[in-house]
Amino acid sequence: MTTKIKTTLLVGLLSLGVLTGMKAQVKYDYAMITYRFNDKILEVDINGEIYKRIDVAKKGDSYYIVPAALSQVKKMNNEGWELFDTGNNLVGVNPLFIFYLRKKIE
């Protein structure tokens, strides 16, 4: 084979590989659930476009009332969302629990 044919075949295969890799890129929707512990407020934000605020009522005698946030995570998990990270922070003296979710776009 001549150098010209080898170069043409190599460029063609490389281009095909790059195009295939670009098409295989997975795209996601992202959501964030925040729970303000002292205020008992649960917030759900999806892609910065859909926002929902839920006031949480105290259930039982438990001091750590995070089940409302975990229930929301479980509900969204059943809808196809995947929990991929968590975090917490202090806003003044108010603990803030954060749950990050993503869902594949098909």
Image (spheres, helix red, strand yellow):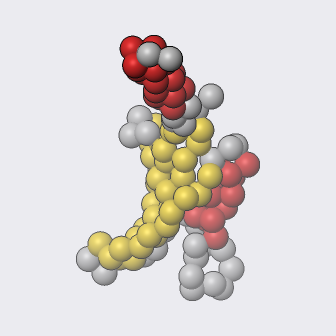
| Residue 73 drawn above or below residue 79 | below
Residue at the image position 49 percent from the left and 66 percent from the top? 86
Toward the right, the furthest residue is: 78
- Where is residue 59 shown, x and y percent of the image? 66, 74
- Where is residue 100 shown, x and y percent of the image? 49, 57
Residue at the image position 73 percent from the left and 49 percent from the top? 78
Q: Nearer the viewer, residue 68 or 101?
A: 101
- Where is residue 54 shown, x and y percent of the image? 52, 54
Q: Nearer the viewer, residue 80 or 21?
A: 21
Residue at the image position 54 percent from the left and 36 percent from the top? 26
| Residue 28 drawn above or below residue 77 | above
Toward the left, the furthest residue is: 92
Quadrant for the C terminus in the image: top right
Residue 33 visible in the current orientation: no
- Where is residue 11 shown, x and y percent of the image? 42, 21
Residue 47 visible in the current orientation: yes
Name the quadrant containing residue 69. Answer: bottom right
| Residue 92 drawn above or below residue 104 | below
Residue at the image position 41 percent from the left and 35 percent from the top? 49
Toward the front, the furthest residue is: 1
| Residue 2 drawn above or below residue 71 | above
Q: In the visual, does 59 lie left or right of 96? A: right
Q: Nearer the viewer, residue 18 or 105?
A: 18
Q: Nearer the viewer, residue 10 or 79?
A: 10
Name the quadrant containing residue 57. Answer: bottom right
